[in-house]
Image (tube, helix red, strand yellow):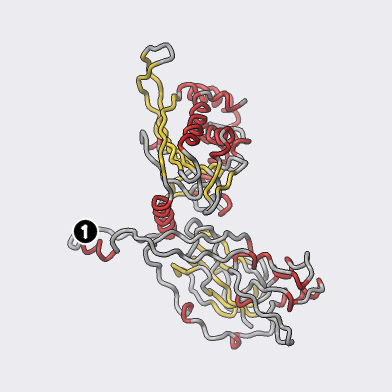
Amino acid sequence: MPTEILMPALSPTMEEGTLAKWLVKEGDTVASGDILAEIETDKATMEFEAVDEGTIGKILIAEGSEGVKVNTPIAVLLEEGESASDIAATPAKAAEAPKPAAESSGPTAEAAPAGGSETTAAPAPAAPAAADGSRVFATPLARRIAADKGLDLAQIKGSGPHGRIVKADVENATAAPAEKAAPAAAEAPAAAAAPAAMPTGPAAAQVMKMYEGRAYEEVKLDGMRKTVAARLTEAKQTIPHFYLRRDIKLDALLKFRSQLNKQLEARGVKLSVNDFIIKACALALQSVPDANAVWAGDRILKLTPSDVAVAVAIEGGLFTPVLKDAEMKSLSALSAEMKDLATRARNKKLAPHEYVGGSFAISNLGMYGIDNFDAVINPPHGAILAVGAGVKKPVVGADGELTLATVMSVTLSVDHRVIDGALGAELLQAIVENLENPMVMLA
């Protein structure tokens, strides 16, 4: 029975993608792990691997096709002994290249990220056990592995299309008796169904009618912009934000940074103010552990490490790469990691595990001359710190005298379901103390 190769979910927010390039053609023989195609997700262009061996019998979706929904058949794989004549009639939904999807009108459905070759297809319902001796559908490689391991294929649930047993199923069954085996892939939830549409304003036709006779350029929404729009709409409509604001005196930090950079110059290291902010936030989350938390639907998850996300602006959208275990890393290590993540984010080369997770985010617009602003929380994070520019201002010194100081305004946006007002104030106070006394962060 020919196997359908389905459009994979290659990122946590992917609902559809662009089949940018086929790296195989009809008639090619492929093995598990071979690269089949390049697929543009909402975040990056990624390689798509084969999960099993066989021959490419038919390509259903042409390269360059946009708006291909996750789990849509994109090609057919033939196993040994099968030919193109064995391919069933192409389903109507795959008969022609999909058109670009309409505007997103609701939050993006979260799809479980998959790694490596396991991304080929979401689990399908398992075929019934062949108790009557009828054929059990399994790939040739899965049959060989099962024979070597002494496994009964009739007792194994298949995670491939239409319940077909694939390599991963028999490999994951080795640790348990055949009658109890269940593939890890089958236990993973399928991509969540898209939630009910959420109003986002007037329809495109209505808006365009308002501007009849006026010159304008229509800008097509790519996958990233659709995802950004959907997630931020979801965030503002479902997260009860509140805001805490503080001014931070930066003079001690700027002097300390200058001294460190002189000492680190020989190593080619140059610390930015943002590096200190990342470290300050990471240590503050350790000082106020109850605030190091995320919203998980019907519960709160308190994280042990400080995994801090940092917003990086790129053309057409943004990434929030995550610096994991930031509290344990030196300033120079954080600086090097952040530069690497930011560079690869701008080139859309980040892997999903590098921008998924974290409990807290930083958005710094100070370099653009913005004095202060309110950032939108990136779910499921509990808070985000909006950082403005450091500017010279008159302040009252400890001795009561008026003096000039470099002051940076910050705003902490907080999810009230996760962090209450006093707890948020305690977290922000810890961040302020770390930045105004930077040497403490090295203790």
Q: Quarter of the image for the N terminus: give it.
A: bottom right
Q: Nearer the viewer, residue 296 or 214?
A: 296
Q: Determine the residue positioned at 63% across, 61% down.
A: 116
- State the residue in front, 414 or 407: 414
Residue tagged by mark 1? 215
* 238 vs 76: above or below: above
Judge left or right: residue 419 versus residue 210: right
- Amino acid beneath label 1: Ala
Tell me residue 302's x, y (percent): 58, 44
Rendered residue at 58%/24% (across/down):
440
Instruction: Answer whether residue 369 is visible to the viewer in this image.
Output: no
Q: Which is more toward the observer, 305 or 225?
A: 305
Does residue 217 appear in this view?
yes
On the rendered structure, is 180 left or right of 382? right
Disc tally is 1
Location of residue 316 in the rendering, given as x and y in whole percent from the top left corner: 40, 53
Which type of secondary structure does the marked residue at label 1 adopt?
A: loop
